[in-house]
Image (cartoon, rainbow, N blue to C red):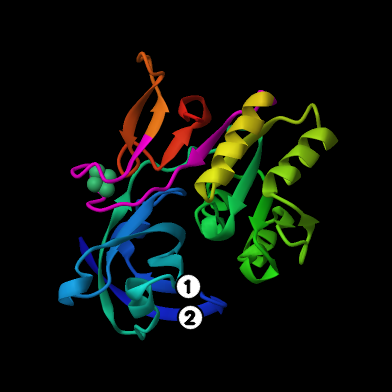
Amino acid sequence: MINGEILENNRLKGDYFLVRFHAPEICSKARAGQFVHVRINDHYDRILRRPFSIHNCENDTLSLVYKVVGHGTRELSELAPGAVCDLMGPLGVGFSDPAPGVTPVLVAGGYGAAATYLLTKQAPQRGLFLLGARSERDVLLTDEYEKAGYEVRVATNDGSMGYCGFVTGLVEQLLAEKPDGKFFFYGCGPHPMLMALAKLLRAHHQPGELSIDHLMCCGIGACFACVVKVKADTPEGWAYARACVDGPVFNLDSVYVE
Ligand code: FES
């Protein structure tokens, strides 16, 4: 656990914020797909930590993207530079680096866009960033991916920006355009999106990894609040894994789709 001083805490768009901490101990080890468990303050009703995917690490500065959805994130959004939060991390299993000669395809839903960004720094080859959002209001971070040299394609459910439909529609388009492409897919987003993506990639025999986030409590494997089903050699065909220590990133081969 370290004390991370807030350097900046700004609204990105709507209810989405980006907070930057001075956190050299975390930045020296962080990988795409890992998370940080943040205790926002010591108020009696706010002692629980909140998990946030690591968005970026530049030098000693850790960036997290969050959406204000309740009391804890509301309080976080009100903290000014100079405030200090207790940070635990980096935690969990992150994404693996794309192999040489393979094109990374990052498939994100909503602010899952934050969790795949470090991949743009972890491999020399450029790839594609496919983002699905409810509407243009929820489209985030596309300029950062463009600056990193990634081709950006957007899908919105209401058609207010880019392709009208789900992000899996963009994946289907890509596979139809480049049937012989050598891709490796990285997914992060809401559970139904990830399950649809898993089915689609399997149907096309494409490899990948998915970040299966879940509600978390302890963040270190002790409470089993975060269990998700993974494929296993059991009569049911699945077993529970803890998203906080066995994941949140799982290889597509082990993802259990109901
Ligand atoms: Fe406690 Fe994963 S959050 S075991």
The residue lying at 65 percent from left, 27 percent from top is 206
Question: Is residue 220 in the magenta section?
Answer: yes
Evaluate whether residue 127 shows in this view.
Answer: no
- Judge from the rendering whether residue 107 lies leftward or rightward of residue 28; answer left or right: right
Q: Residues within 10 Å of mark 2 (few under 14, many from 20)?
A: some
Q: Is residue 103 above or below residue 16?
A: above
Looking at the image, which residue sits at the far left? Answer: 44
Q: In the rendered structure, are the residues bearing label 1 and label 2 in contact, judged by CB atoms less than 8 Å apart?
A: yes
The residue where tag 1 is placed is 18
Question: Is residue 212 in the magenta section?
Answer: yes
Mark 2: secondary structure: strand
Residue nearest the viewer, comparing 53 with 15: 15
Give the residues drawn in magenta, as a range. 204-228
The residue lying at 65 percent from left, 65 percent from top is 139
Q: Amino acid at mark 1?
A: Leu
Residue nearest the viewer, comparing 152 with 225: 225
- Judge from the rendering whether residue 130 lies leftward or rightward of residue 243; answer left or right: right
Q: Quadrant of residue 78?
A: bottom left
The residue lying at 58 percent from left, 59 percent from top is 110
Q: Whole-percent x and y of residue 74?
A: 38, 78
Mark 1: secondary structure: strand
Q: Amino acid at mark 2?
A: Asn
Q: Whole-percent x and y of residue 35?
A: 37, 53
Residue nearest the viewer, comparing 241 with 32: 241
Q: Whole-percent x and y of residue 209?
A: 52, 36
Q: Whole-percent x and y of residue 79?
A: 34, 83
Q: Is residue 69 above or below residue 100?
A: below
The residue where tag 2 is placed is 10
Quarter containing the N terminus: bottom left
